[in-house]
Image (spheres, rainbow, N blue to C red):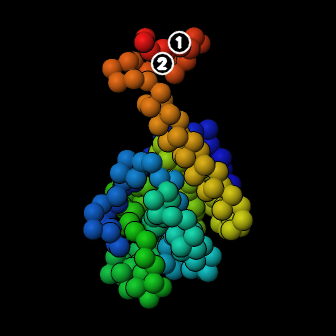
């Protein structure tokens, strides 16, 4: 596992989307924890572990808080793993969550998003927090318990951020500049009778 000091997650370079009526981006999913499962349909570990786990996450966590996204990132057997073959694969394996096809590179076999995230291979699972920051990246298998705990931690962070934002906005009368005590001095707001 790679754990990161929160930093903006790289944008996805996607050639084509499946299971969604619009292109997706980290920015469009802001406010949700993102579970990105990078896979190849001919990768045994992806088929036996990574994709079934992504499906369990999709079925377990509410879509209002967690977005599961597949990324078909082909770095070998390019002729066999076409978008047409992927469409059939997604249907046969009944994968309902959105899946993007990683954009091929102009030079070399490693697709663009795979390069941007410095993925070592597939399956790779990436966790992006609700602010759009890269938080964890796993190459190979990760236990359901570990992954569930990591996702729950990020969901709780997002809820706390939302609650804090709501409390800050409701604690100041309209027209009063927000003072969240960032300067070290917290003003008392009183109303005159």
Q: Is residue 20 left or right of residue 90?
A: left
Crowd rating for badge 2 (residues with CA inside 10 Å; few <14, some 14–19, many 20+):
some
Q: Is residue 57 visible?
A: yes
Spot occupied by residue 14 in the image (x, y as percentages of width and height): 35, 60
Report the residue at 35% width, 73% height from top.
Answer: 19
Q: Is residue 18 left or right of residue 187?
A: left
Residue 99 lies left or right of residue 58; in this view the side is left
Numbered tag placed on residue 21 in the rendering:
none
Would you call the spot at circle 1 few (<14 residues within 10 Å), some (14-19), or many (20 or more)?
few
Q: Is residue 137 visible?
A: no
Residue at the front extreme?
A: 193
Mark 2 and mark 1: Cα distance apart in space: 7 Å
Residue in front for this viewpoint, 149 or 123 = 149
Relative to 13, residue 92 above or below? below
Report the residue marked by disc 1.
Answer: 187
Is disc 2 placed on a helix, strand or loop? Answer: loop
Of helix, strand and loop, which one carries label 1? loop
Identify the residue position indicated by label 2 in the image.
179
Percent position of residue 83, x then y: 34, 76
Q: Residue at x 48, y 18 (%)?
A: 179
In contact (CB < 8 Å): disc 2 and disc 1:
yes
Viewer-side label of 2, 1: 1
Give the answer, above or below, for where 121 lies relative to 48.
above
Q: Which residue: 44% across, 88% down?
A: 92
Residue 77: x and y in percent read: 46, 76
Residue at 34% across / 72% down in the picture? 18
Q: For the C terminus, which image quadrant?
A: top left
Q: Nearer the viewer, residue 44 or 97?
A: 97
């Amino acid at each position: 596992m790679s754990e990161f000091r929160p930093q903006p997650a790289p944008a996805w370079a996607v050639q084509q989307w499946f299971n969604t009526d619009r292109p997706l981006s980290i920015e469009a999913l802001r406010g949700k924890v993102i579970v990105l499962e990078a896979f190849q349909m001919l990768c045994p570990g992806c088929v036996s572990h990574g994709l079934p786990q992504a499906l369990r996450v999709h079925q377990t966590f509410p879509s209002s808080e967690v977005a599961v996204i597949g990324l078909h990132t082909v770095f070998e057997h390019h002729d066999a793993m076409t978008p047409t073959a992927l469409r059939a694969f997604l249907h046969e394996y009944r994968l309902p969550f959105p899946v993007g096809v990683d954009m091929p590179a102009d030079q070399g076999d490693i697709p663009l998003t795979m390069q941007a995230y410095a993925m070592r291979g597939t399956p790779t699972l990436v966790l992006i927090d609700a602010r759009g920051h890269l938080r964890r990246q796993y190459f190979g298998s990760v236990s359901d318990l570990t992954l569930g705990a990591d996702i729950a931690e990020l969901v709780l962070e997002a809820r706390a951020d939302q609650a804090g934002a709501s409390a800050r906005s409701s604690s100041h009368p309209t027209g009063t500049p927000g003072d969240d005590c960032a300067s070290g001095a917290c003003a008392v707001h009183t109303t005159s009778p």
